[in-house]
Each structure stands twice: as C-alpha cells, then as structure tokens.
Image: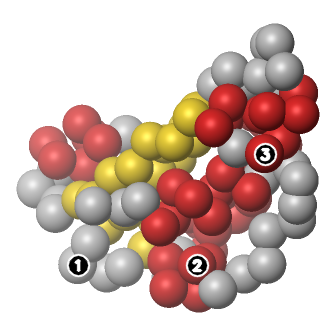
Amino acid sequence: MTERQAREQGLWVRTSVVSLASSTRGWIHGPGGEGFVKLVEDADRGVLIGATSAGPAGGEVLYGLNVAVHAEVPVARLQHMIYTYPTFHRTIETALGALR
C-alpha cells in the first residue's frame, strides 16, 4: 500500500525515506549506487503496510519488506533484527529507525 492509499483509507501512518547512497554499501558501490527505501507503517497497529525500494538490488531489498508486510511483522521486531553489513539491505534498519 502506498502512503497515499493508506491515508485515503483513514489510517494513521508513519513514513520514512532513506537514501541508498547514504549507506555504507551505497558508498562502496560508488557511482550508480543511488536509490532509496521508503517505508509506510500503520502506526496504530505498529506494522508495515507498504514499502518501496529503488536502486541497485532494489528487488532483492523489496523481497524482505514484502514478507514483513504480508506477515504483519511488528516494526519493533524488525528493528531488532541483525541486518547484514555492508549490504543495501542495511538501509532497511536505518529506514525503520527513521519512521516518524
């Protein structure tokens, strides 16, 4: 679900957008490492309801987020996972911490 769709359904959402280039893996990747991860959380239930990933390995990053959305994994649980370093997946950890 997009942020707009969630708001149109009357949900209270928190969102975050984090640049892939700001991650260690983005820095290692160098030119062409641009992109982002955006998360949409249903703040009342504390679960992700949407996510977008664009950039190198965007589909692979999105896969894990897709599982989290469909399984309704609590954001608190996702925040305590160990994200492999240095991968683009590590950007998810930063995006979870930036939910506002």
Mark earlier in primary sequence (2, 3):
3
Q: Which numbered disc covers residue 79?
A: 2
User: Which x, y percent locates residue 86?
Assistant: 89, 53
Q: Which numbered disc covers residue 24?
A: 3
Q: Label 1: few (<14), some or many (≥20) within 10 Å?
A: few
Residue reaching furthest to the top: 31
User: Which x, y percent locates residue 1?
Assistant: 41, 45
Q: Does residue 66 appear in the picture of this structure?
A: no
Per the model, the C-alpha gap separating discs 1 and 3 is: 32 Å
| Most foreground residue, 92 or 70 | 92
- Compared with 16, 26 (above or below) is above
Label 1: which residue? 44
Colouring scheme applied when the structure was drawn: secondary structure
- Compared with 93, 7 (above or below) is above
Discs 1/3, front:
3
Identify which residue is drawn at 74% across, 57% down.
90
The answer to whether residue 5 is left or right of residue 38 is: left
Q: Point out the image quarter for the C terminus.
A: bottom left
- Compared with 50, 28 (above or below) is above
Mark earlier in primary sequence (1, 3):
3
User: Which x, y percent locates residue 45?
Assistant: 31, 81
Q: Label 3: few (<14), some or many (≥20) within 10 Å?
A: some
Provide the secondary structure element on which disc 1 rests. Answer: loop
Identify which residue is drawn at 46% across, 51% down.
39
